[in-house]
C-alpha cells in the first residue's frame, strides 16, 4: 500500500502571493522540492513539515493530511449549526 500525504501548500502560497522560489528560499530547500511536495510526488520529513507550518503560521494538520481535503465550496463539507 502506498502512503500518500495530501497537502495545501499551493493553496496557501496562492493566498499569500508567494512563489515556489520564495517559499523554498525561506525554508532553505530547492524550489523544485516545493513543486514535488505540491504535486504529491514527495512527502516531507517531519522537520520540513513543521517548518512549512511555522512559515504559514498554521497547525501542521491544516497543511498536511493522510486523507484528501474536501474541496472548497463542497456542500458536503459545510457544517450546519
Image (cartoon, grey):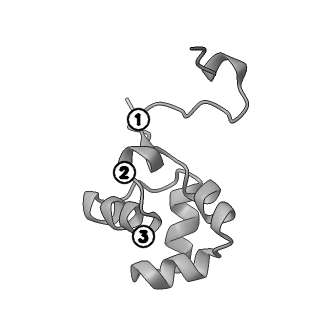
Q: Is residue 75 above or below residue 41?
A: above
Q: Which residue is mark 1?
A: 66
Task: Tell which tag, 1 or 2, sits nearer the viewer.
Answer: 2
How dense is the environment of label 1, judged by Cα within 10 Å: few (below 14), some, or many (20 and up)? few
What's the residue at 39%, 83% (across, down)? Answer: 28
At mark 3, the secondary structure is: helix
At mark 2, the secondary structure is: helix
Q: Residue furthest front?
A: 81
Left or right: 63 with respect to 54?
Answer: right
Q: CA distance from mark 3 to mark 2?
A: 10 Å
If you read the primary sequence from the N terminus, does the residue marked by circle 3 or circle 2 appear first?
A: 3
Q: Position of residue 14 (x, y in %)?
A: 68, 63
- Quadrant where the N terminus sits is top left
Q: Which residue is mark 2?
A: 60
Left or right: 34 with respect to 19?
Answer: left
Q: Are marks 3 and 2 in contact (CB under 8 Å)?
A: no
Q: Position of residue 27 (x, y in %)?
A: 41, 78
Q: Is residue 80 above or below residue 34?
A: above
Q: Which residue is mark 3?
A: 55
At mark 1, the secondary structure is: loop
Amino acid at each position: 500500500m502506498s502512503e500518500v500525504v495530501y497537502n495545501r501548500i499551493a493553496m496557501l502560497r496562492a493566498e499569500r502571493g508567494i512563489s515556489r522560489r520564495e517559499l523554498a528560499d525561506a525554508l532553505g530547500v530547492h524550489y523544485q522540492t516545493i513543486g514535488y511536495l505540491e504535486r504529491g510526488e514527495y512527502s516531507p520529513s517531519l522537520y520540513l513539515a513543521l517548518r512549512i507550518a511555522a512559515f504559514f503560521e498554521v497547525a501542521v494538520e491544516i497543511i498536511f493530511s493522510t486523507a484528501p481535503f474536501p474541496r472548497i465550496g463542497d456542500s458536503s463539507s459545510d457544517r450546519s449549526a
